[in-house]
Amino acid sequence: MKAYERLLLENKAWAKEKVFEDPEYFERLVNVQTPEFLWIGCSDSRVPPNEITQTHPGEIFIHRNIANMVVHTDLNMLSVLQYAVEVLKVKHIIVCGHYNCGGVKAAMTHSSLGLINKWLRNIKDVYRFNQQELDQIENYDDRINRLIELNVKEQVLNIAKTSIVQQAWKNRHAPHLHGWVYDLHDGLIKPVFEMAAGSALDHPIYEFQWDDQAH
């Protein structure tokens, strides 16, 4: 059996098991999607959001990219964010990185890796913002893992700087923003940063204002 054929076979077994356990399982999913959470995570295959949080289909709206980045020019991510906030009206947005992240490690090198150089530039900026703290960490793995935490924090701040989230904070005092890091060694998630709805940003220049007529 070829590898991709095994995936299709496992899918059939999974679907059959779900219907056996709950005959209306798929009917409920077809008709409604009301997740409380938007998850922005890394594309790494070892960090499946539903599995590590033991949630079911329909509970988490998921966007993944290399190194769980929130880039203000990324229309894909921004479209997901807008839909989650304005249509699904999620209550929480989680940026979840993971220790030993290959994207962060690559950003800390001087190697030219092609197209991904442009993406990793954003992580290099996070290092530059925090260079004084990071350069004091002698152990390489510890320094990388601290950068991973700081990168998660920076991406949460980037979410808060969007007009999408700030408008939602004004209108419905949500969503709450969370920065988490998953540890591949023990499977545990470590919260490293959070922002309640309406929190002050790291600089007022990023704050939007609306009058009663403007959106």
Image (cartoon, grey):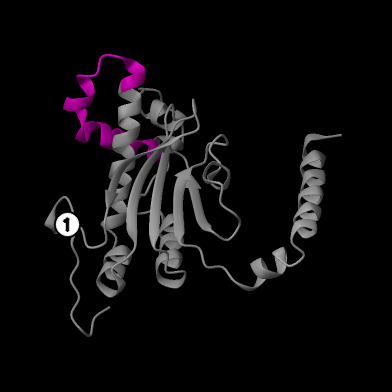
- Residue 105 in percent (x, y) is at 40, 26
Residue at 50% x, 63% y is 35
- Residue 44 in percent (x, y) is at 53, 36
Relative to 214, residue 78 above or below: above
Which residues lie in the magenta part? 118-142
Look at the magenta stretch and give its main secondary structure. Answer: helix
Secondary structure at badge 1 equals loop
The answer to which image quadrant residue 170 occupies is bottom left
- Residue 39 in percent (x, y) is at 46, 52
> Three-letter amino acid code at disc 1?
Ala
The answer to whether residue 172 is left or right of residue 43 is: left
What is the residue that sits farthest to the right in this orientation?
1
- Residue 17 in percent (x, y) is at 78, 52
Residue at 18% x, 54% y is 201
How many neighbours does mark 1 have within 10 angstroms: few (below 14), some (14-19), or many (20 or more)?
few
For this rendering, which residue is in front, 80 or 97? 97
What is the residue that sits farthest to the left in this orientation?
204
What is the residue that sits farthest to the top in this orientation?
138
Q: Quadrant of the C terminus?
A: bottom left
Relative to 103, residue 59 above or below: below
Q: Which residue has dot 1 on it? A: 200
Q: How many dots with numbers?
A: 1
The answer to which image quadrant residue 131 occupies is top left
Magenta residue check for 24: no
The answer to whether residue 212 is left or right of residue 182 is: left
The answer to whether residue 204 is left or right of residue 178 is: left
Residue at 49% x, 47% y is 64
Magenta residue check for 130: yes
Q: Quadrant of the N terminus?
A: top right
